Image (cartoon, rainbow, N blue to C red):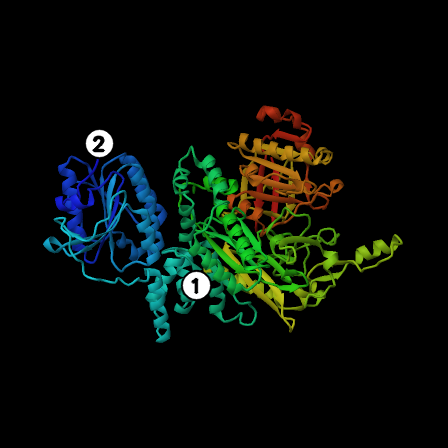
Amino acid sequence: MSYERLSTGFAGLDHVLGRFLPGDNAVWQYSDFSEYLALVRAFAGAALDDGVEVSYVRFGSNPVLLDSKVRIFELEANNFESFASQINRLLLGNGTGGAYVFDPLSELKSSWLSDLSIANVFHVTSQRLFELNAVSVFGLEKSAHTNPALNKILDSAQVVCDVFGIGDECRINPLKLWLRKTPGPVNLAGEAVETPTVVDPAGLDGWNSLIEESKRLLAAGETGEANRDLLIETTMGSEGNLVELAKRNMTLGDAVKIAEREIGSGPIGGKSVGVLVARSILEHTGRFEGKMEAHDSYFLGSDLFFEYIIANDLWQLWSEQKTPTSYFPVGAQLNAALKNGTFPPSVRAKFSQMLEYFDGAPIIVRSSSLLEDNFGNAFAGKYESVFCTNQGSRESQLKELEDAIRTVYASVMGDEALVYRLNRGLDQSPEQMSILVQRVSGARHGDLFFPHAAGVGNSSNIYVWDATLDPQAGLMRLVFGLGTRAVDRTLSDYPKLVALDKPELPVDVRDPSSHSQRYVDVLDLQNSKLSTIALNTLIDTPIDADWRLFASVDHPTVMRLRHAGRKLNQTPKVLDFKGLLEGTDFAETICEMLATLANAYDYPVDTEFTVNIDAEGVPLINLVQCRPLQTKGLGSRVQMPKDPKDVLIKQRGNFMGGNVRMPIEYAVIVRPEAYLQLSTQQRYSVARGIGRLNRALSDTSFMIAGPGRWGTTTPSLGVPSHFTELNNAGVLAEFTYPKGNFRPELSQGSHFFQEIVEQGMFYLALFTESRDVVFDIEKITDLPNHLVDVEPGLASLADVLHVAKLDGQVLYSDIATQQVICCS
């Protein structure tokens, strides 16, 4: 129904206030709930008398405001995003016009503990109501909210009035009237009156009140378990395995320290929770005292993420992106917009205070979304992390930090993250980006900053390359310098792979120098950037540690150079970490840490860590990440074929995927000899072609095999396919091709590895030059090539890509005997 103005429910008040205009969002600030109750009932009654539809949005525990004569919508106010989205859908469904009454916003305070979120939900809701020309009434309890929240609500509302008393004693003090002259205090008859002089103290919001109360309990020597649990639930979530682990291992003092390091409010996200819980478990045992570096981080709460979205007028785009037709196109718009937003002055001031604390020390700004690093979803490599060298003036430091935060925020809407969430059924799940700001572990060496070593540790060794290894002892992927080279398999050299039960056992003994780390990632403080430098420019320079812990003389290279008559200006060395692994208790300590965490989690774990050697030569470990290692389990043991025929593949070890019996309908082979002849650009075309085959064969059981590494960004090392171009394959195989120096990389701990495990794919590393390995590629390439039948547009790649239809081939694997065979 069309109308111009709605009555407040009181004729005299209407005369003074000019009634409610279409689009008005009115806020009544009351001292007693009965004051608000009387005003909204009068408003709703008048609207119904005028034939206006009234909707009551109920979400609080307060007495019911309106009876069944109005439309009542009961909503769950679990968190900002879900609540704001529910209201948005409700308003759009109702259409233009109408009158709305809301339970008091102050009802959200006890459960959300965040005035910022309350102000934000009012802001986005009032905007939508204004656009719909609806009239709404909200309530706020006086002295229950902080001044910044009240100011934001005042800015967003069209009408704001203080209320004193009820009935004949009721007095209204208008503080804001949009497009109308604001009168002085009046009674309900519209007569001018005086109001009592009341100074409402600016209250602490629920979150800060909880922190202050907890600090008083600590000072009194009390354990404060109820406060501890509430602090943990507010920062880490109200339920789940990690939350229970936190409650079992953290004290009230631990929880207060976390809360005092949070900027904003709300959950701090999966990555932050993971590392804090893991460290608390290790510290709780008392077995690692003197072996761990202290944790030093700040946390940007999830409420800050939405504050940024709302401050940059992106909320409506954010809401629209959830729809199927807008998921990718609007996601791309948001990705671009989030990179270019601005932060409110109050937030920038808190960032500056944090930078003062770090005082020029390098920091890393890491994603810590609500879904990340939890049981079921790792999001490995899907969201960004950005190093900040934190040098120069405070203003330049602040700009560097804000740019890093924008990059991380924008990665929520990055292509890889969107595809990942869609593929895992998370496209409609609430996702908020919290941020973990960590002091970078390491030390300054000249103009460079780096730790002595870093790595990834898994409590289960899913790859076993030797029959004597114990899969439950764990495995480590170790690098010198920053850990970026440990988590990324796209680089141009090889991390050190260490079986923790036999650290001295190499993966490949033939030529350790050619398959070792040759480059080091460091922070270049002079040029304020992450840099990669050649190892030989760094080795034997002062690093406040004995180089023999990390590097040994490369005797095979020395012999080759001497036989060739070459003069040695510098003794060649290879990063084998022999001194660290065999001369200290480092490997034993990591193994014990992983076992302790896996036992506490009752689940395999995947960790990231750094290592720094102290003045006494002791390795100090800094655990910087811990998450459940997503595995599908070993499965039931299968009967291996006793008399295999037409064997395509046969070997022991170097596979993962558990016990399987998997029929293979198609084999997709990258012909190594043809691939070797291609230019770099042509190799990328092959990778995209494989992506098209991956989609075309998605309803079949198929194997993809290629030379060297899958997922590399260096085509000279393998095929640069993205994981999304391989994810439908049942089996993914890498094989050696010595002519092109193509070799598989056992990449346990890398982001690519995490995706293979989460997808439940079976992986094979085929070192074909070994006498114990059978890979009869000719059996496949001698079969007719069905490439064009499967994907007609790939005819130009027929010399490189071979798609064979197999007849009765089945892949078998047995974990106990470490056998794998593909045969008919």
What residue type is disc 1 on? Ile
Instruction: Give the alpha-carbon distance from disc 1 to disc 2, as whole Å.
Output: 53 Å
Say which of 433 and 350 sits in front. Answer: 350
Horizontal side of residue 701 vs 195, given as left or right: right
Q: Are marks 1 and 2 in contact (CB under 8 Å)?
A: no
**Residue 300, image x and y in percent?**
45, 56
Q: Nearer the viewer, residue 21 or 32?
A: 21
In the picture of the structure, the residue carrying the numbered disc 1 is: 258
**As shown in the figure, which amino acid type bears the numbered disc 2?**
Ser
Residue 2 has which mark?
A: 2
Residue at image x 40%, y 66%? 256
Which numbered disc flags the more N-terminal residue, 1 or 2?
Answer: 2
Kindly report which numbered mark, 1 or 2, lies closer to the viewer in this rendering.
2
Is residue 51 rendered to the left or right of residue 333? left
Seen in the picture, residue 502 relative to 756 is either above or below; the reply is: below
Residue 482 is at least partly visible in this image:
yes
- Can residue 517 be seen from the camera position used here? no
Q: Residues within 10 Å of mark 1 (few under 14, many from 20)?
A: some
Q: Residue 170: name its quadrant.
A: bottom left
Quadrant of the frame with the N terminus: top left
Residue 730: percent from left, percent from top: 55, 38
Q: What number is the disc on residue 609? A: none
Q: Is residue 605 left or right of residue 712?
A: left
Q: Secondary structure at mark 2?
A: loop
Circle 1 — which element? Answer: helix
Give residue 774's position: percent from left, percent from top. 68, 41
**In-image side of 347 versus 384 (left or right):** left
Residue at screen point 74% across, 63% down: 540
Classify residue 388 by image quadrant.
Answer: bottom right
- Judge by depth and name the residue closer to the eye, 593 or 53: 53
Q: Quadrant of the C terminus?
A: top right
